Amino acid sequence: MSQLLAYKNVFVKYRHNHAGVYSIKDLLTTFSMPFQYKTILDDVSFTLNKGESLGILGRNGSGKSTLLRTMANIVKPYKGTIECVGSIAPILALGVGLEMELTGYENIDLLLALYGQGRDKKRIADIIAFSELDDVTLKQAVKCYSSGMLARLSFSISFANDCAIYIIDEVLAVGDFGFQSKCIQKINELKTQGKSIIFVSHFPDEVERICDKAILLEHGKIMYQGNAHDICSKYREMF
Amino acid sequence: MQHLNQLYALSKRNIIVRYKHSLIGFFWGFFKPLLYLLIFIVIFSSQFSSTSNHVLYITSGILFWFFFSNCTSQGVQSIVQASGLLKSVYIPAIFFPLAEVIGELFNVLLALSVYFIVMHWFGMVYTLQLFWVLPILLLFAIFSFSVTLILSALNVFYRDVGILWNTIQPAIFYLTPIAYTESLIPQRFSFVIKANPIYYFIKLFRYPLYEAIAPDFYLMGKCVLITFISLSIGILLFNRLKNQFITAI
């Protein structure tokens, strides 16, 4: 099996603004150095092979989202190497990148361009069909949408990307039951096509259902990695 | 190629969003300079009795001032407003201020084409020298982009940079000879005007637009130097700060 993604001893540090200096006024009235470095990812190593799906579990603030951002090349590690073969679909999170003033159609167009995808008729028709939003809704400005509708739209656009790895960050919680099962179905379909899924969730049941492997993060360190079932039971024990 | 598509999509979005729910669309772009023009004609009409063609004189400056003002005051928020996109898609952060400037460049070119027609009645001389406006505009756009880069990067960390900038803008405006002639400034205060980089660009624009002659190449050289220095500072600062954007927005 070919390796798609390999993390070797990756460290990520953020400059952390601990004194709450957010304006020039604050800067002039604070005497301590406002910035400190904080380690977010601490010596993270793992590999992902083609066709495997990886679950990422961990408490709030344990570094899950940062880990996803390093995959998408948005955050750069200050130490360690990330080797990535094959394309990665944009991180799927709620309503990201949707321009509230634009209509649904205009947003599809904008996001496909930003994701670097073609904007042919078939792809757009697929997106519309998957989102199950009607023509009237799509002609409305996105700001009038409910959060479930926003999730449908952004989810549909992200799935239209033709990539080797798909990153899904806790989005299944918002859509209604019908859309959730449709998404699970879509994820399984992608898996049978040999695509890799990276799945972040707080629900170990979902991770067990979707993923083969899993990682348990704690304070930016990988506590356990291995078979999804074992990791999920470890995660349940944490609470 | 993909990056070009991204930049194009962002610029298009900026142009569409700006006038999306407005009554008269991009005509707002003409309305603001026009209003200022009327104010200045009323207030400064006595001062301008010595200047021929004062409508042409004012418009040839005011149009580009508003280009600069719009670029910077909208661009200063560009990184902060793009937080959702920056956190989820890999797009070079520099595209957000750049797209603001490109969107504004589109608007000023529209305004300029209307201006070329209307100014016929205010004594504009149509010569080949008018084409000098395009390279000067490009130079001015790069300068505006540099200022936008610096402001937008700083605004991520100190959110009152945007407020501060909007506060000092009128001061810069009145320190630029747009509504008045340079000769009005007393000799001992002329250094204040000369410290203002926009003064040089506005003066350069007036060669082809107002006087209908080729620009002074010495002044042009000065503007190229100003642009080069500000762009260097802008890019250096932006590159130093851009890795911290994700955590601060």
Image (tube, coloured by chain):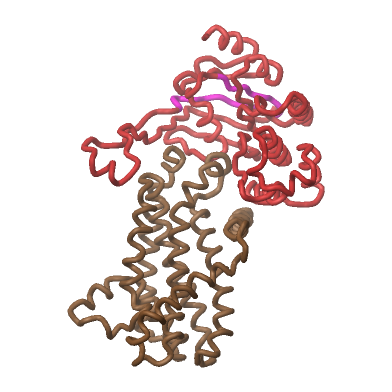
Chain colours: A red, B brown
Nearest the eye: A120 or A130: A130
Residue drawn 28% across and 75% down? B193
Q: Which residue sits furthest front?
A: B42
To which quarter of the image does residue A56 belong? top right
Q: Position of residue A148 (x, y in %)?
A: 68, 32
A92 vs B191, left or right, is right
Expressed as whole percent of the image width and height from the top left, the position of residue A141 reads 67, 48
Vertical order, B150 against B249 (above or below): below
**Residue B36 can be seen, yes or no:** yes
How far from the left and from the top, in percent, is residue A48?
Answer: 62, 27
The residue drawn where x is 72% and y is 51% is A118
Q: Tell me the quarter of the picture where residue B84 sits.
A: top right
**Residue B102 at what x, y percent from top left?**
54, 64
Q: Which residues are magenta?
A: A41-57
Direction from residue A190 to residue B101 in the image, left or right: left
State how many labels appear. 0
Q: Residue placed at 37% from the left, 85% from the top?
A: B45
Q: Is residue B52 magenta?
A: no
- Image quadrant where one finds the N terminus of chain A: top right
Q: Nearer the viewer, residue A44 or B133?
A: B133
Residue A51 sits inside the magenta stretch: yes
Give the residue furthest to the top. A237
In this rendering, does residue B221 appear at all?
no
Q: Is residue A201 above or below residue A70?
A: above
Chief SS of the magenta region: strand
